[in-house]
Image (spheres, coloured by chain):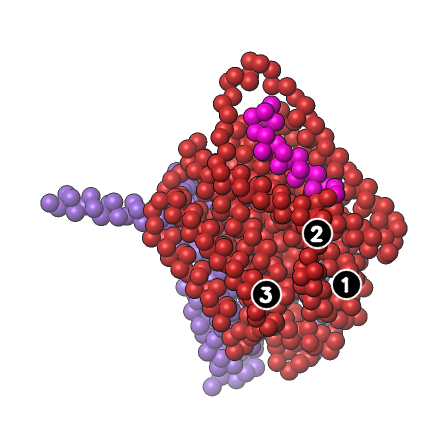
Chain colours: A purple, B red
Amino acid sequence: MIAPALLDNLIKVLINLILATAAIIIVKRDVLSLVSTYSIQSLLLVFVASVLYMENANVMLLYLALLTLVSKAMIIPHFMERIQKKLNIKRDVEFHYLSPTSALFASVFIILVVYFFLFRILGELSLSNVFFLGATVGVSLTFMGMLIIFSRKQTITNIVGYLTMENGVLLFGLFLTELPLIIEALIVIDLIMLTLLATILAFGINSSIEEFHARLNPFKRFAAFKSRLLNNEGEDE
Amino acid sequence: MILSIYAIVGFVALLLILLCRSHRSMNALSTVHSLAYFTLALYTLLYVRLPSFYLQDRYFFIDHLGIYEALIAAVLFFFASVYSKGYVEGLINIGELDRGNLKLFYVAFNLLLISVTYSFFSNNLALFWIFAELTTVFSAVLIVTLNAKKNIGAALKYVFMASTSMLFSFIGLIFLFTLTEHALGAGTLNWDLLMLNAAQLSPTILLASFVFIFIGMAAKSGIVPFHAWLPTAYAKAPSAISAILSGSVSSVGVYGIIRAYAILHQTAAAGRISTLLIVFGLASIAVAAFSMLSQINLKKLIAFSSIENTGLMILGIGLGTPVALFWVLFHKLAHALTKAVLFFSGGIMHRQYGSMHAEEIKDALELQPLASWGLILGAAAIIGMPPFAIFVSKLFLLLQAAKLSPVLLFVVLALLLVAAGAFAMFLSRVFAQDGGNNNNKKIEKYIVPDGMTFSIVALIVIIFVLGIFFPQYLSDLLNNIVAELGIK
């Protein structure tokens, strides 16, 4: 059995690392490394959930960690990388209103404001230190994600911003172990659907309408698959 | 029990649509599906004791507000699917929709009906949030089934704005959950429990969570300043879908605000929430009214009018009196039906002229008398002319506003007049322009299929009847809702 104090410290370290990944996402220009930073961020989230599980022995956290690992650290980054290769966008150099440096300063400002805001609002609830840190970083991450969406032009970068927002909310949500698993799982599935849809739409912006529909429409894909299968059988004969 | 029948009907409808091949049968199934939901809602209203709860943790419930909203949605989806039969076939013929995307269209259509309905039946607010997010997914899919690149941009904007804002709503829900965990011992997001225990919860944290929840709901319903996605999405969507987006999907957001407001109304934070809602409502009406003035695209004009009407509803909720809420609820119904008339008529114009621009629509009264009268009567109804239904709700909402402050009445009235003026300008421009003899011969008359005619005529009759005759039963229902929401 590991001492609770050590686990608490571990969670604090992980949460700070998550914050660091968000900072990297804010300044990076290279799209591919944006996606891999995001997948590291998701992996850190998985670690937080696992450490929380060691503390609480709540099986739900383990399921959530697994769900996050499969969807956010593997499937979504893989999907985005494929799309990104297809679209051949290597760098997102266009920043709308903020340069990366000022965006970083803005993030520091966000974190401070969120901290004081939460301190005033949730102060009366005598929450644990770790919970409070999780809440602060979670909410800050959400706002930092929004900052990415507003300051970048490429849709694919915007999606990474949106995903960062999601991770912020999920980090915050992890500390609510009482929320029933079925609901937490549904939320994660919901978010995955939205992300996939957004990625397909982003793909559609830069490709022809036929290619887009071929990707969007599962029935068309199914039909294409069937006809390919039939054709193969024909060749065999 | 009722809820399982709802689920089974929805499941069977989806399954059959997946199996069938022709457009005709997919459309017929969608019509039957919405009709079944309508019947179920009526049956529930008449024979089931409300509120009734489902599942052991009471995740779902049906109360008067939920069933009223579900009923409106079913009516709207019914008319939209009847209208779609001819309309979608037309889209295919003209090449705007691929036959291969037909199945996707109808599957998304029915999934949207299911998720909208279930969002109204969710007692657990997190569950409500999930269904609300799903409505965004399916609406976006419906927008992009058309063969136009611009639709993808519109859908992307919609998905981004709605879902990023909804993440803030979720933060609000987490606040709420943490709060109940500390105040009541066990955390809950069940609306009935929150209502019951609202008085024991800290008003400050409740206020903070409401503000967060409000952001997402405001984006879903297109309240200024979260409305940027709405005009393009409504304008690019197929007209049958625009009607649904305006009447049902954005209604989910307003519904969420009503639920959250009801909780806050029981606490000391009620006054501040009211001010917030009135400010946002007023801003929406103002921005929408002035944007309408410069519109030359018919569908965008109608879309901005949706923002204006949602603004009026938010303002009405903010007034916080039982009478105001009563008329907000009626306005929801009247607005949904009237907007459907406008979008459906606009859809015919688009088939006829291939465009929604004012200068393209020529000799409309001659070529498309039904759509022309649909637009004229629909516009008269939406700006609040008697004898249509919206006249009544606008009148009483304005009277309630006057009670709070005469200045508010004056400002709202002036803004509503601006919006009315925008409709009048647009229509007089369209119907006054002469196509000239040369052009006239080139334009081939688009024959309106019966289903489209039926939907428009039936809806006009309904909003007319609702304007001159207010059934006692409806009034009892609305009073019940207001009482259940604890607005005193």
The chain letter for the residue carrying disc 2 is B
Q: Amino acid at mark 1?
A: Pro
**Badge 2 and badge 1 both on one subunit:** yes
Where residue A52 sits: x, y (%)?
A: 52, 76
Q: CA distance from mark 2 to mark 1?
A: 21 Å
Residue B258 bears which disc, if any?
none
Q: Secondary structure at mark 3?
A: helix
Residue range corresponding to the magenta coloring: B363-386
Looking at the rendered structure, which numbered label has been put on residue B45?
A: 3
If you read the primary sequence from the N terminus, does the residue marked by circle 2 or circle 1 appear first? 1
- Amino acid type for the residue under numbered disc 3: Leu
From the viewer's perspective, tell me whether residue B421 is left or right of residue B147: right
Task: Looking at the picture, tell me which residue is in the foreground, A46 or B133.
Answer: B133
Vertical arrangement, residue A8 with respect to residue A153, above or below? below
- Closer to us: mark 2 or mark 3? 2
Q: In the picture, which quadrant includes the C terminus of chain B?
A: bottom right
> For mark 1, what is the residue?
B322
Q: Chain of mark 1?
A: B
